[in-house]
Amino acid sequence: MTEQKMTIEAGWKFDNSYARLPQSLFSTLNLNPVSAPKLIILNESLATSLGLSVQDLQSDKGLAVLAGNEIPEGGLPLAQAYAGHQFGHFTMLGDGRAILLGEQITPLNERVDIQLKGSGRTPYSRGGDGRAALGPMLREYIMSEAMHGLGIATTRSLAVVTTGESVQREMKLPGAIVTRIAASHLRVGTFQYAANWGTVHDLRALADYTVQRHYPEVAADENRYLSLLQAVIKRQAGLIAKWQLVGFIHGVMNTDNMAISGETIDYGPCAFMDDYDPATVFSSIDKNGRYAYGNQPQIAAWNLARFAETLLPLLHTDEEQAIKLAEGAIAQFAELFYQNWLAGMRAKLGLLGEEEQDETLIKDLLNLMQKYEADYTNTFLSLTFDKRDGNAMFGTDEFTQWHELWQTRLEGQQESDEAAKQLMKSSNPALIPRNHRVEEALQAAENGDSSVMEQLLNVLKNPFVHSPEQEEYATLPAPTTYPYRTYCGT
């Protein structure tokens, strides 16, 4: 490695446990320095929670680390190998444009990955330039912070810097790097790589490492690998339910984009749904709706089945028995997801306790919302604050009948009306990162004005406070005949 490691007072406290796994699972790297880095945005509260000095990160030396020009003390740059089913087709992948600098040990003694995304070519680049454009990196920053504000497990963004260089896509765009923070970057695809191109020893080492890092509670179980599978399934069931409850559409749920930790990862063509429709797709590359909003639970189960397949050699020495164990675990996903989703929908409607009619009440409302093209987020806001404006559904006899049934259910609760109202307020966000607001912020930032993005991030930080300034950001975009489309930004 030709770069000289730097010592700064920023607060880096690195370990490199992933680098102690079998060499087949990663490649150590030299950095790919950029010419003229500039800090666009720094997540100061996140930096502080990581034990890092905001002032030092803003210095020339701090910027050099965030731009991938210098290695912080204790860092060991590497690219992780992984594979993945991309739209159902299996291929070898890997960190083609990302460098894992190391694992920061936080003041709370937590371990998180520090990764530079858009930092240049790696052995897994497959002909790509390894770089990224400013717009997609800022989109990842906005969307991941919005998800964090909503209380949904997610990777986060520490900073975005421009590189002073252009990247060639359909046109020349300003290059940028995002510093991504994750509990880890272990993916279903990481296990697929180990299972297909590694040895059983490699696979076992990876599984043991995953247990130690993310699921230590199962380490002493009789069959720790079955327990690992069950724990990942349970965590993913809760995560996908939360996506559905806020109308989030990931857009590219390939197996390499499913994190073993249960975090939302890889914010490419993601967006939030406006009008409620399970068939909603925003991604320009999802031609057949594989990853539509309504398909996300089934795709998650499919991805988890691929994860289970990788673990078969570890689950049991007899392949037939291993398959039975895996199938039994995967079969639990649908019920786990549904119970998480049902509990969340009850909360969105202020329903305390469980009644038999709740499922029908919820599904009837969703059917009405789809029929009348009602906005998903704002419909629940209207119910929360008893406002019936701007929604054609509210003037129909069908809704009136539904509303009477809902009120009867609420009146039958032992808890107070105020308890139900508070439950709804804490379950229905005042706003989401509306697509037109995100695009507005990105366009301004690309033109040198970060203030629009900073204002948006500020109101997204606490979406359940329902403050007056958040109301402006809950407004819908102007009608258009052109459907909104998102792009991977690669």
Image (cartoon, grey):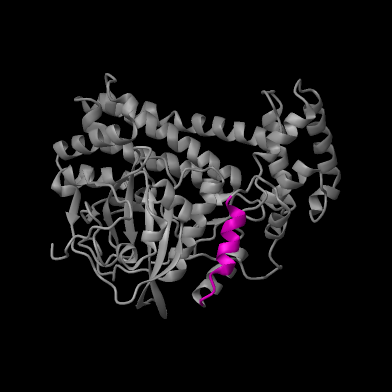
Residue 272 pos. (x, y %): 58, 55
- Asked whether, in this view, residue 489 is left or right of residue 378, the answer is left
- State left or right for residue 319 relative to residue 177: left
Front residue of this view, candidates 53 and 173: 53
Image quarter where the N terminus lies is bottom left
Q: Main secondary structure of the magenta part?
A: helix
The quadrant of the image that shows the C terminus is bottom left
Residue 20 against residue 60 in the figure, above or below: above
Residue 469 magenta = no
Residue range in magenta is: 448-461
Q: Is residue 184 above or below residue 162?
A: above
Residue drawn 62% across the image and 65% down it: 436
| Residue shown at the point (67%, 31%) measured from the top left | 359
Q: In this rendering, is residue 36 above or below 200?
A: below
Look at 65% across and 46% down and name the residue there. 429
Q: Return the x and y of residue 306 as percentages of the image width and height.
A: 33, 41
Residue 205 image point, x, y percent: 19, 36
Labels in figure, total: 0
- Depth check, front residue: 452 or 45: 45
Q: Is residue 406 above or below residue 375?
A: above
Outermost residue on the bottom side: it is 171
Examine the rendering and report whether any part of residue 68 can be seen: yes
Front-lying residue, 442 or 237: 442
Place of residue 104 in the rendered image (x, y in percent of width and height, measured from the top left): 31, 47
Q: Is residue 324 visible?
A: no
